[in-house]
Image: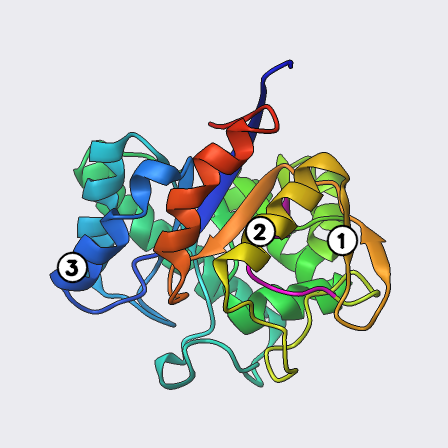
Amino acid sequence: MQQQYIDINCDLGEGQTLADCDKDALLMPYLSRCNIACGKHAGNEQTMYQTLLHAKQHNILCGAHPGYADPDNFGRLSLAISIDEVVASVVAQTQHLAHIAASLEQKLVHIKLHGALYNDAEKSPELAGALCKAFTTQLPHLSIIGLADGAMQTAAQKHGLAFLREGFMDRAYLTNRQLAPRTLNGSVYTKSEQCIAQVLALVQQGALETLDGGTVSVQVDTLCLHGDSPIALDVAQALPNELAAVGFVIK
């Protein structure tokens, strides 16, 4: 069996305390990269610094995870602000995290939008285009992580930015290739077996059964595990052996 590699990313730094960061660090041995909250939808100066430090100790890649500045709703509700305001906020959040990373002689390598902002960019080619245009001039060295075959992928490619096609192991899809809204029953997986099955389907078949009864083809470069999921650690610990059994190594 020929060995193949798979990238696993995880949203981290979304707590408020050092204890939250220590809990996040338990996931890091099973990851290849992390997306660090930049203090607006979640996190703060302390958690950004500590998450970057832990990532350096575990030798995993780091990226920015900017979201809407709405901590009361964890960045999961759309805000009625202009595209220019969104772009300015995302760039500022990313630069803030990059500044903290530089103090640790650490560097950021990617950007992944959070929550409602991630979804809004996929629904709005105009927003996706404005973000990617800004990235080319202000953050050109960073790759973009976004939904496979979505609006951000199209915009990133148009502007010459490196792009990683993302799939999700702990969320259900719809036949329109979007993630099923969290308001739908069954949209968020609650059993590690569901997540493992989805990972294996993505890496072996590149196809998934959807929540609304169909199937979709999804080719991915990186798979996301949500760090705030109650089953995140169980899934992370099971993944290496499950992937190794079908010829994949996390890298």
Element marked by disc 2: helix
Q: Residue at x 32, y 64 (%)?
A: 14
The colour scheme is rainbow
The vertical placement of 75 against 55, above or below, is below
Per the rendering, the mark at residue 46 is 3
Q: Residue at x 42, y 35 (%)?
A: 32
The quadrant holding residue 125 is: bottom right
Q: Which residue is mark 2?
A: 134
Q: Which residue is mark 1?
A: 208
Residue type, mark 2 in image? Ala
Magenta range is 166-173
Residue type, mark 3 in image? Gln
Image position of 115 (left or right of 204): left
Camera-near label (2 vs 1) is: 1
| Mark 3 or mark 2: whose residue is earlier in sequence | 3
- On whether residue 172 falls in the magenta region, the answer is yes
Q: For this rendering, which residue is in front, 150 or 201?
A: 201
The quadrant holding residue 17 is: bottom left
Image position of 10 (left or right of 145): left
Camera-near label (3 vs 1) is: 1
Per the rendering, the mark at residue 88 is none
- The percent position of residue 13, horizontal first and vertical second, equals 29, 58
